[in-house]
Amino acid sequence: MSKLKGREVLIVEDETLSHSTRTARPRPSIEIAMPALSVFVFQCEDTDLHALTLYRSGDNLPSHACSECWRYRGRLRMTLQSLVTLPLDAAAAITQLRTDGLSLARFSSGIILFPQ
């Protein structure tokens, strides 16, 4: 017997269990589809500098990187399939977004068409 916070605990070992029954059995794999995070696209006004961020408000956009103001341009899903629509290294952008919540890239904004 041993004590645990003022209570007595009786530890019993069953010598009849074989080694194979003491090993943990793998749990059944349950795959749950997780929705992709949204990535918000901002453009530094009148430049080709774009920021992808996980923050809808754009609060984490670096003000020192843009002498003008950041303009919201649209929203994408944080998936390779979605981000490859932009002319950037989508895998690297996802890695930066996961690490820093932000990825900066330069590309022509003419390829992004948003309804007026």
Image (cartoon, rainbow, N blue to C red):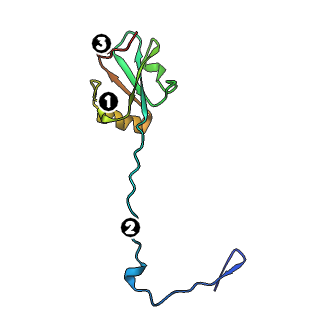
Percent position (x, y) of residue 84?
A: 28, 29
Q: Is residue 8 above or below residue 89?
A: below
**Of pointers 3 and 2, the one earlier in the residue sequence:** 2
Q: Which SS class for mark 1? A: helix
Question: Secondary structure under badge 3?
Answer: helix
Q: Is residue 22 left or right of residue 90?
A: right
Residue at 28% x, 26% y: name it: 85
Instruction: Identify the image quadrant of residue 104.
Output: top left
Name the residue located 41 percent from the left edge and 15 percent from the top edge. Answer: 44
Check residue 26 in the rendering and tell me which mark sits there, or answer none: 2
Q: Amino acid at mark 3?
A: Gly
Q: For the view shown, which residue lies furthest in the right direction?
A: 6
**Secondary structure beneath label 2:** loop
Quarter of the image with the C terminus in it: top left
Mark 3 lies on residue: 110
Are the two marked residues, 1 and 2, in contact with CB atoms closer than 8 angstroms? Answer: no
Residue depth check, mark 1 versus mark 2: number of the one nearer the observer? 2
The residues bearing labels 3 and 2 have C-alpha atoms spaced at a distance of: 52 Å
Relative to 60, is 26 on the left or the right?
left
Amino acid type at image mark 1: Leu
Residue 33 quadrant: top left
- What's the mark number on residue 83? 1
Whether pointer 3 and pointer 2 mark residues with C-beta atoms closer than 8 Å, the reply is no
Callout 2 amino acid: Pro
Q: Between disc 3 and disc 1, whose residue precedes?
A: 1
